[in-house]
Image (cartoon, rainbow, N blue to C red):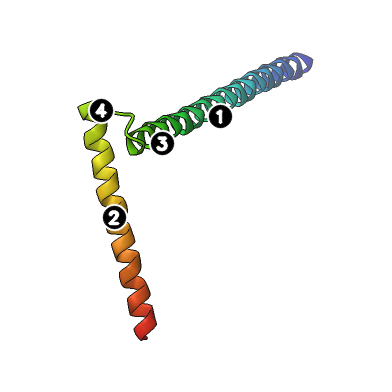
């Protein structure tokens, strides 16, 4: 009977060790994934900042590369449409 409890104790100990290892691995993976998400968000912010800088240079007449100009002109058109639609909203609200 003592042998049974010895074997059972060993199995429980092994399972506990495996569970602890899996938990540590899961936590480490989550930590790494969180770090990856943070790095990706930082890159997205930097990409947005680069885009804003290029657009500002275009707006100031400092950009002549056709690829940038095409994108910047599209942004300008959308900005104009936004302004037009905002004015339309103001008109509608003023008549209600």
Query: Residue under circle 4?
Result: 64
Q: Indicate which label's residue lies in the foreground, 1 or 2.
A: 2
As measured in the structure, the alpha-carbon distance from the residue carrying label 4 to the one carrying label 3 is: 16 Å
State the SS at label 1.
helix
Q: Marks 2 and 4: CB-CB under 8 Å? A: no
Classify 10 Å Cα crowding around label 3: few (below 14), some (14-19), many (20 and above): few
As measured in the structure, the alpha-carbon distance from the residue carrying label 1 to the one carrying label 3 is: 27 Å
Query: Residue under circle 2?
Result: 80
> Where is residue 22 drawn, in percent x and y?
60, 22
Classify 10 Å Cα crowding around label 1: few (below 14), some (14-19), many (20 and above): few
Task: Name the N-terminal-most of marks 1 and 4.
Answer: 1
Please, which residue is most extreme toward the front here? 61
Q: Marks 1 and 2: CB-CB under 8 Å? A: no
Query: Residue under circle 3?
Result: 52
Residue in the foreground of this view, choosing between 37 and 86 = 86
Q: Quadrant of residue 50?
A: top left
Query: Residue under circle 1?
Result: 34
Q: Indicate which label's residue lies in the foreground, 1 or 3.
A: 3
């Amino acid at each position: 009977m003592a042998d049974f409890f010895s074997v059972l104790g060993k199995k429980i100990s092994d399972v506990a060790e495996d569970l602890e290892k899996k938990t540590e691995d899961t936590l480490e993976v989550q930590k790494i994934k969180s770090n990856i998400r943070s790095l990706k968000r930082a890159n997205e912010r930097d990409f947005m900042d680069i885009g804003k800088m290029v657009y500002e240079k275009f707006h100031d007449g400092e950009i002549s590369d056709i690829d940038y100009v095409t994108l910047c002109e599209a942004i300008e058109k959308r900005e104009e449409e936004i302004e037009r639609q905002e004015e339309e909203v103001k008109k509608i609200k003023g008549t209600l």
